[in-house]
Amino acid sequence: MATLHLMVGLPCSGKTTLAKQLEHEHAALRLTTDEWRVRLFGQDAEHPDHDARHGLIEVMLWNIASRALELGTNVILDFGFWAREEREDYRARARQLGASSEVHFLDVPAEELLRRLAARNAQPSPTTFYIPEAMMKPWLAIFQRPTPDELERRA
């Protein structure tokens, strides 16, 4: 049975680094929104169409992921999944395809996230998305941490 791995955490928490490790450990297809977004639209964090573009990329990557799961391939979605409702939605989607799901939560204190963000922004990369610190701070408040039952449950 294929498994859908959900990478949960805020930017700079280490999701993509762990996703790359899991990709090899589980022979999984890794789909990371930032890599696609930067290649398609460049550094568009402050562009008025940023959110709409992000949504389109997630839809496209889910279409690829769902087909891979149907074929029995493990998939890693490196989306962040900030809300419990979103995590539950994707877990239900996996179940409908006959796949299991796992949540991988990277819990990093706010101060460390901001330190990592500053370091990341100072070293631009063709696959790393630039995020102004002013954008990151409100995200710290709206992120919904997974509950212990979410983390223990393998759906």
Image (spheres, rainbow, N blue to C red):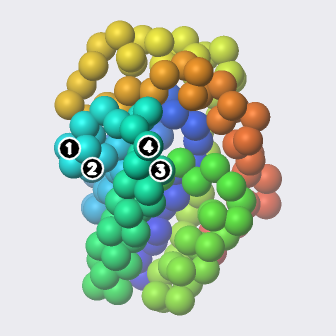
Secondary structure at numbered mark 3: helix
Q: Identify the residue position indicated by label 1 in the image.
A: 39
Q: Do the residues labelled 1 and 3 touch (CB within 8 Å)?
A: no
Q: Identify the residue position indicated by label 2 in the image.
A: 36
Q: Nearer the viewer, mark 1 or mark 3?
A: 3
* x and y percentages locating residue 70 in the rendered image: 35, 86
* x and y percentages locating residue 38 in the rendered image: 27, 40
Q: Identify the residue position indicated by label 4 in the image.
A: 48
- Quarter residue 18 falls in: top left
Q: Which of marks 2 and 4 is in front?
A: 4
- Quarter residue 83 falls in: bottom right
CA separation in Å, label 1 and label 3: 16 Å
Secondary structure at numbered mark 1: helix
Q: Which of marks 1 and 3 is nearer the N terminus?
A: 1
Secondary structure at numbered mark 4: loop
Q: Do the residues labelled 3 and 4 touch (CB within 8 Å)?
A: no
CA separation in Å, label 3 and label 2: 14 Å
Q: Identify the residue position indicated by label 3 in the image.
A: 51
Disc 2 marks which amino acid? Answer: Trp
Q: Are marks 1 and 4 in contact (CB under 8 Å)?
A: no
Q: Which of 72 and 89 is in front in this view?
A: 89
Q: Do the residues labelled 2 and 1 touch (CB within 8 Å)?
A: yes
* x and y percentages locating residue 115 in the rendered image: 54, 12
Q: Which of 68 and 59 is in front in this view?
A: 59
* x and y percentages locating residue 65 in the rendered image: 35, 72
Q: Which of marks 3 and 2 is in front?
A: 3
Residue count near mark 1 (Cα–Cα under 10 Å), binned few <14, some 14–19, many ≥20? few
CA separation in Å, label 3 and label 4: 8 Å
Q: Which of marks 2 and 4 is nearer the N terminus?
A: 2
Disc 1 marks which amino acid? Answer: Arg
Quadrant including the N terminus: bottom left
